[in-house]
Image: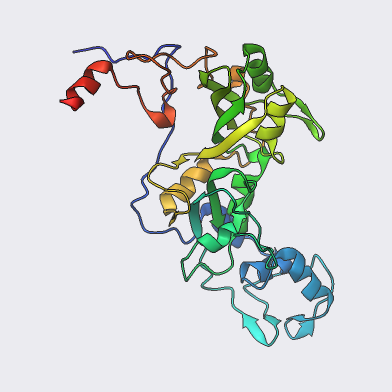
């Protein structure tokens, strides 16, 4: 029996993937655990019903437009028991039953913004989700207007918290092209973390895929999500980001999902994302010494037919020149 092929630069663990050929998810364990609790904040209960954002719901409460058991409530931070108390807004009684959660994966194109502001004139990511049953959804985290790639949209607040908050450590991978030929020293600085205005970054897993005099192509994985962190980090080491695309969120990849397209997530995919997160908020940084999949070399391994090969993972193994010649026949 032939021995299994080993990649150069040390063995690597293939990232976990899950099947998407399932029925769309309608809830998550993060959501179910919250529903088992006795009380919930009133503004969150209103937001979950699609009334408005939590901040706008606070304004409705402060104006006395929300009643609980027939009595107006104006105290912000009020908690209710949905199973035992009746909430009414504008003459409409909100029922605790039948609240289906929605989960979507969108490949955001450039020029689209991640906001729910109704007065926004630019195209919004949530408007690209054309499911008539989506209700009021919002993006899980953000990608800036010029960045492209994967973004999650949902109406599940507990799921959003577990996936988007940096302390839970769900890894997100980006295909990045920077200006100029990046040096090994600059790559190491990014891997170990750099100082930004709000503090030091937690470090990143960086794989150099190609370096030329005019630009360098990299694969960057982060567990945190400071505002425009990738662009600001590389600017800190002297390299302007020319293009940035998010290609992976936890076990989800952009494979088969064209720019501007979306699809619902299955329950298996939702749970796989939650399993990637640390519920206790103690996720380790992406510094190479903490990561089993951290690169051992600065460059991606060379393929047999010349040029730079991608670093396994979502791109798979490089094909040999022999296979390529067979296909040409």
Toward the viewer: 71 or 163? 163
Residue name at image x 52 percent, y 17 percent: 295
Residue name at image x 68 percent, y 77 percent: 85
Q: Is residue 63 above or below residue 139?
A: below
Task: Name the outermost residue toward the left.
Answer: 329
Residue name at image x 64 percent, y 85 percent: 92
| Position in image of residue 302 (x %, y %) | 41, 13
Q: Tell me the quadrant of the picture where the N terminus can be found.
A: top left
Toward the viewer: 236 or 225? 236
| Position in image of residue 284 (x %, y %) | 64, 28
| Position in image of residue 168 (x %, y %) | 63, 40
The picture quadrant where one finds residue 44 is bottom right
Residue name at image x 54 percent, y 39 percent: 246
The picture quadrant where one finds residue 228 is top right
Q: Tell me the quadrant of the picture where the C terminus can be found.
A: top left
| Position in image of residue 253 (x %, y %) | 45, 40
Q: In this view, does 27 lie above or below 178?
A: below
Q: In this view, does 195 lie above or below 135?
A: above
Toward the viewer: 62 or 235? 235
The answer to whether residue 193 is visible is yes
Q: Which colour scheme is used?
A: rainbow
All told, the count of numbered labels is 0
The answer to whether residue 171 is visible is no
């Amino acid at each position: 029996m032939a021995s299994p092929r080993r990649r150069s630069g040390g063995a690597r663990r293939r990232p976990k993937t899950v099947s998407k050929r399932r029925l769309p998810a309608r809830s998550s364990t993060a959501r179910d655990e919250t529903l088992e609790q006795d009380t919930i904040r009133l503004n969150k209960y209103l937001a979950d019903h699609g009334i408005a954002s939590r901040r706008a719901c606070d304004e409705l409460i402060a104006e006395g437009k929300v009643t609980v058991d027939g009595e107006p409530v104006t105290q912000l931070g009020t908690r209710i028991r949905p199973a035992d108390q009746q909430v009414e807004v504008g003459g409409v009684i909100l029922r605790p039953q039948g609240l289906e959660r929605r989960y979507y994966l969108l490949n955001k194109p450039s020029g689209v913004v991640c906001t729910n502001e109704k007065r926004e004139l630019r195209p919004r990511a949530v408007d690209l989700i054309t499911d008539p049953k989506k209700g009021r959804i919002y993006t899980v985290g953000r990608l800036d207007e010029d960045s492209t790639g994967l973004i999650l949209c949902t109406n599940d607040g507990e799921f959003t918290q577990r996936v988007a908050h940096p302390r839970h450590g769900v890894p997100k991978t980006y295909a990045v092209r920077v200006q100029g030929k990046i040096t090994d020293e600059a790559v190491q600085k990014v891997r170990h973390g750099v100082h930004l205005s709000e503090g030091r970054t937690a470090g990143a897993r960086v794989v150099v895929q190609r370096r030329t005099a005019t630009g360098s192509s990299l694969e960057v994985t982060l567990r945190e999500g400071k505002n425009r962190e990738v662009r600001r980090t590389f600017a800190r080491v002297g390299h302007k980001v020319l293009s940035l695309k998010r290609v992976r969120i936890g076990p989800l990849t952009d494979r088969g999902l064209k720019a501007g397209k979306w699809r619902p997530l299955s329950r298996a995919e939702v749970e796989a994302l939650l399993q990637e997160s640390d519920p206790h908020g103690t996720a380790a940084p992406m510094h190479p010494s903490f990561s089993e999949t951290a690169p051992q070399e600065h460059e991606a391994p060379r393929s047999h037919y010349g040029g730079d090969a991608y670093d396994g993972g979502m791109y798979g193994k490089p094909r040999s020149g022999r296979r390529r010649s067979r296909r040409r026949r």
